[in-house]
Image (cartoon, helix red, strand yellow):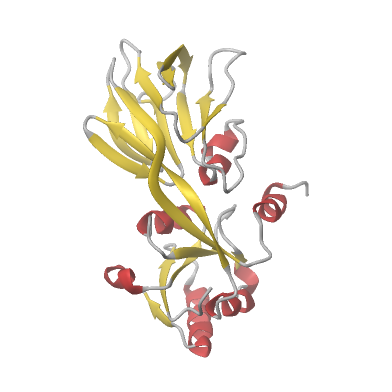
Amino acid sequence: MRPVERAAVLVRTRDVGPAVASLQTVADRSGVELVFDEEAFDKVDLAVVLGGDGTMLRALSRFLDSDVAVLGVNFGSVGFLTSLAADHFEAGLERVFAGDYRTVELPTLQASYGGQVLPAVNDVVVTSGTVGRAIHLEQVVGGENLGVQSCDGIICATPPGSTAYNLSNGGPVLVWGLDAVVITFIAPHTLHARPLVIGPETSAVVANRSPDIDAVVLVDGRRVQELRQGESVTVHLGPLRSRLALLPEQTFFSRYRQVFGVR
């Protein structure tokens, strides 16, 4: 990659003051201008995140379908999408600023409901609007009805989103580079419900069939819509892409082993 001249900076809201100072020192030494004002983010070469996966998600959403890749320094608890450790990120950052990095394109989802269309970097979740109450959700995948299931909800996740809420509910991990969606039930009231992986030409329609409980649609963790009985949301791979920056030697499997491997 070309050396970085201007870099956007996104930080989580706490505990990163000293890291910002270190970042500025590395930038000054590398001749890189740091941009903290989001209104000026349109003319940057790279985005640097000081935070965890939540801040990474915000940055990836901000730079969707642009040429700007997002590099993460992990100040979170998991940080699977980040590339550099918080306690010694300066050397790696110098390499990145010099152009010694690569980018990975990641697919996104598109959620359609009530005439609205929203992109999702991580996942689209349909869940019960009443805590502690199961709902009845119907799945129509690829135009074929797969039936109604009593559950707490359904997760539709991208490959990067597959290591988030999907993973914690027993869903499979999708390797970066796949154009696929994984659909996983949340606490299904059956022994037979299994996750399902679908490709780019297939849509999933999730409808609320509960007579007395509204469902809620969450896009990347944000509550965007209520689904009353009979209402639905359609989810499929979208046209937009996000871009993740990594050191050249880093791979999906090295990150997977480092974060989720046996201790």
Residue placed most toward the observer, 153 or 15: 153
| Residue found at x 24% / y 36% | 116
Q: Is residue 85 left or right of residue 25?
A: right
Displayed quadrant of residue 217: top left
Residue 98 spot, x, y in % from top left: 56, 81
Q: Residue at x 47, y 78 (%)?
A: 4
| Relative image position of residue 227 (x, y in whole percent) | 29, 24
Q: Position of residue 160 (x, y in %)?
A: 53, 46
* In-front residue for pair 23/179: 179
**Residue pushed farthest right?**
263
Q: Is residue 124 visible?
A: yes
Of the pair 13 and 217, the residue shown nearer to us = 217
156 shown above or below 79? above
Percent coordinates x, y for residue 40 in the rendering: 29, 72
Query: Quick one: 142 or 41, which is closer to the camera?
Result: 142
* Residue drawn where x is 43% and y is 56% of the image: 60
